[in-house]
Amino acid sequence: MTPAARNHRRAALQIVLAELRESLFMALDAIRAHKLRSSLTLLGVLIGVFSIIAVMTALRVMQRNVERELSQLGAHSFMAHKFPAMMFQGRPNWWAYRQRKDITYAMANEVVRRATLPTAVGIEAVFWGGQVESRFASTAPNVQLYGETPGSFPVRNWTVAEGRSLNDSDVEDSRDVTVIGASLARTVFPFGDALGQSLKLNGIHYTVIGVLESRGGGAESDQENIAIVPLTTGLDRFGRWHRSLNVLVQADGADRYEDTVDEVTGILRVLRKVPPGADNDFEITSNDSLIAQFNQFTRAVRLGVAVVSSIALLAAGIGIMNIMLVSVTERTREIGVRRAVGAKKRNVMTQFIAEAVVLCQVGGLIGVALGLIGGNVAGVLLKLPLVLPLDWVVLGLVICSVVGVVFGTYPAWRAANLDPVESLRYE
Amino acid sequence: MSAPLIHLESISRRYQMGGETIHALREVSLRINRGEYVAIMGPSGSGKSTLMNLIGCLDTPTSGRYFLNGTDVSHMDDNRLAEVRNREIGFVFQTFNLLPRSSALHNVELPLIYAGLSAEQRRGIALQAIRDVGLEDRMHHKPNELSGGQRQRVAVARALVNKPSILLADEPTGNLDSKTGEEIMALFENLSRRGNTIILVTHEEDIARHARRILRIRDGLIASDESREPLHETAG
Ligand SMILES: Nc1ncnc2c1ncn2[C@@H]1O[C@H](COP(=O)(O)OP(=O)(O)O)[C@@H](O)[C@H]1O
Ligand SMILES: [Mg+2]
């Protein structure tokens, strides 16, 4: 590049920088001058961006949840339970699900006894989480407590790294023993050697007989911050009344999977006296069914968001155009002055488009902030880690800019094509 | 003799109003040399502003040719004209035409923005220009915090900040009382003495007397063109 060309480039850049600065001030000025109209318009942008960000954040939170569910089941495994894993098949009839019979311990044991195809069947209860104390440390009250039988371990994809797993006599005798997750072990036994130590959980002491192997990778610490006790011990302590259990089943390879699902489904239908031809009064959840459900749900939600935010942004865009046209009229003289001191049409044009974009970005940034908060509320309720969907934040702000450019172009064009002499005389 | 700074050759400017044609300027020819101090006088509607806008490259003639510094600018496109205005012309208006929400300093910087100077360069040059009109202690004030005379001085600083070839002033004292008007004229006097080319529109004889050449316009024609001894040419 020749020095002249470089100078020329630098000059052009300086003009753009100055224009952006001018536009920022002009935009803030326009907002200040027309508070009501600006806030209504910004509200439109805000709703548009908010709905995108909030829903996408919430979806991502749920996706984490689904992934967590998925990674909790081993290969060729499924789970029979009373409530759907996720309530988003588009018919939120919680009441109908509540009316279903619980899967009792007796019923689950009967499944274990009758099923011939599975390689492993476990019975599980999920108890409320709580605080765990050792003589070294205590945790936050967020440890998940499971009651399990020995068959649950392969289905849950749990391998014991140290010590031993639960055995049948632990369950039969309702022993006060526990197998703990790797992350819990790190917290309460910072010096290692958890085996044989005592742990206090909801006021009762349990002896640690095993520590699970860490799976490593992503959100492992959350899934490994768990304590597992014999199912019967848990049921005795926390009650059997109104408690529905999960039946965890692992098939002998992919080709036996369908048959195994059919067998377990059949047994449960008989035990629960479901009339022939009626729907199951329980759920079968596998990785595949979760993924399918979730994808179907996601598609519907995305479509809804696209519609809502498009309408909001269209309305906002028209508002932006209106504000900008007023701004151009009010600044007619200013435009004349700028043209007189050497502004080209395209300088005026970019300045006004930039003003529209800045205007949109003000609403957009607020929308992003509120959207992140709103979307993460779901995560907080589900006790999931916070999510920052950077890609959607960027996309939301890009969409804002596009709205600004699209709806700012006509006013900017009007501004740029004002006759300098006329605009200087404008009263 | 070198080429004149401004050379108008049979310039006409017509406006179409309904079915009627208004002849704002009729085949005006005119030469103005570098360093001249010219006053344009004439009754309202005679075409003074039209002539100023043409000389200032804000407007283009319907017919005729205009050479500025030897370059034909009568058929330049809009972008080139903007560059010419930025480099060669400084405008001072009757109504000041400052940006109302910007400080005096920022108003003075404005032409430098479109010259593509960096923020620091702009600041330095604008500061000097505002010092030259004696307003450095007011440079952060908004126009509505300044008196009429101060506003017009800011406008003069803005007009001069790019070191233009021509200073064009359309009734610069029209909105000022006579005392402040005289102050602005003294400023012009000073600029003229330092070699600036000034063209001034006025309908007041008192103001016109400051110039060394007076053009009188009537109905879009130059009625008279007289050079004269300036009023305040004090010895020394
Ligand atoms: N944009 C325009 N459209 C129509 N007529 C115009 C326009 N601008 C100026 N004129 C006419 O041209 C003539 C000269 O105007 P102007 O140069 O403004 O006069 P002055 O400045 O001497 O008062 C007037 O008759 C005026 O009405
Ligand atoms: Mg006039």
Image: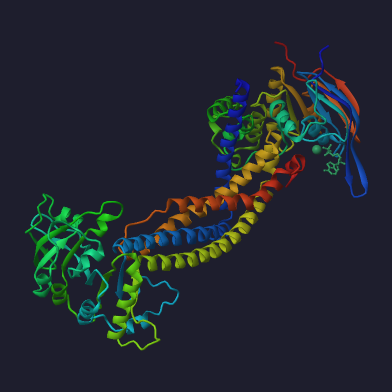
Quarter residue A389 falls in:
bottom left
Left or right, B132 with respect to A268, comes to: right
Asked whether A284 or B19 is in front, the reply is: A284
- Ligand 2 shows up in the quarter that is top right
Q: Is residue B90 visible?
A: no
Looking at the image, residue A100 lies above or below residue B141: below
Which is more toward the observer, A160 or A324?
A160
How is the protein colored in the picture? rainbow
| Residue B179 appears in the figure | yes
Of A119 and B91, nearer the camera is A119
Number of marks in picture: 0
The image quarter containing residue B231 is top right
In the shown orientation, is residue A392 left or right of residue A63?
Answer: right
Question: Residue A405 appears at what percent x and percent y?
Answer: 61, 49
- When asked about the image quadrant of residue A19, the answer is top right
Q: Residue furthest front?
A: A255
Where residue A76 appears, as percent x and y from the top left, is 32, 65
In the rendered image of this protein, does residue B176 appear above or below residue A231? Answer: above
Which percent across, then down, holds residue A12?
61, 32
Image quadrant where one finds the N terminus of chain A: top right
Q: Nearer the viewer, residue B225 or B84?
A: B84
Rendered view: B209 above or below A221: above
Residue at left offset 17%, top offset 53%: A186
Q: Please provide percent x and percent y for residue A179.
A: 15, 62
